[in-house]
Amino acid sequence: MTHDEADNPYAGLLVDDAHWAFGAGQEFRPDEDPVATAVVAPVPEGVDRTAAAAYCLMLGDDALVLAQRLSEWCGRAPDLEEDIALSNIALDLLGQARLLLARAAAIDPTLPPPLPDGSPVPPEDRLAFFREESGFRNVRMVELPVGDFAETITRILLFSTWRLALFERLAASRDSVLAALAAKGARELAYHREFAARWFVTLAGGTQESRRRLLAALGGLWPLWHELVETHPIEVEAAAQGIGVDPGSLVVDVEPVLEQVFATAQVEWPSIGALAGVRGRKGRDGCHTEALSRMLAEMQVVARAHPRGLW
């Protein structure tokens, strides 16, 4: 090692592979990865594998996209405590996304797109970083630009209240992987909902400006709320086979919680209608807002520039 190299604290990072940031040149080994080994449990008998994989993809994309949006708050939140809280919520959702995307790929190996050079990259990474916008199946609420703090709090409240109700039921899934993931994720989502509800009430009862921003955020997000509780044919199939949950059945669990939060905050229940799709197609069908394509361009740029890199 030369004198210059000895003085450079980063010199060792470039040994063996220029893609050090993505795994220091170590080859991906599914048999040594705890996620890869956990998600390959057999699919329950009689389950349509294509529908089951698509269902996992929907729930995984919801978490992945919102996690990316919330990570944009890192270093920008009102204070250090909220900065850490939002980062932790993003990490929780990212963990859920990784398991769900990995399960989708384990159920249907044709899902992850092959890399241009055939590099061995975990299937969940291929699904996250090498799909086009039309291949994502998340609801449109999670993909909107990050907005202000009131918008973020309102989005977390609506999403976590819905997803917690879903995961509480999903814990009884016939699919062992989904059941285990939901049982763990429900505990995380309970914190997400509590955090958002506390801040929702605080902002509503704070200054005139904080209340104005909160009401504006609720009005802007509510047209997309309806998409969360609309039932897609894939969700109908997953529920019928005992591995998923019909989101339409969650209204009786979700609305009382939101009504309680709104009443405490002295906020009226919104009367705004649902945002229409494009020729009837919405997020679950791969039809998204322009915000998603811009977000994916930023999220995927490094992986696409260095497809041999390993995370």
Image (cartoon, grey):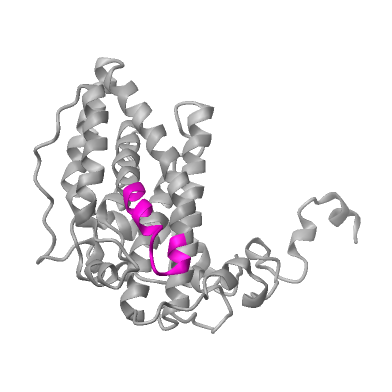
**Compared to 56, does 70 lie above or below?**
above
Asked if residue 123 can be seen in this view, the reply is yes
Quadrant location of the N terminus in the rendered image: bottom right
Predominant secondary structure in magenta? helix
Quadrant location of the C terminus in the rendered image: bottom right
Quadrant assignment, res 263: top left
* Viewer-side residue, 1 vs 197: 197
Residue 174 in the magenta stretch? The answer is yes
**Compared to 115, does 306 lie above or below?**
above
List x then y, in percent, for residue 293. Answer: 32, 60
Q: Is residue 218 left or right of residue 7?
A: left
List x then y, in percent, for residue 221. Answer: 22, 42
Residue bounds of the magenta highlight: 163-179
**Compared to 291, does 70 lie above or below?**
above
List x then y, in percent, for residue 162. Answer: 29, 47
Quadrant assignment, res 113: bottom left
Q: Is residue 172 left or right of residue 84?
A: left
Query: Residue drawn at (21%, 55%), measured in percent from left and top?
Result: 249
Query: Residue drawn at (75%, 60%), measured in percent from left and top?
Result: 13
Query: Residue drawn at (24%, 30%), measured in percent from left and top?
Result: 260
Q: Is residue 226 left or right of residue 307?
A: left
Query: Residue drawn at (64%, 70%), measured in percent from left and top?
Result: 33
* Viewer-side residue, 239 vs 223: 239
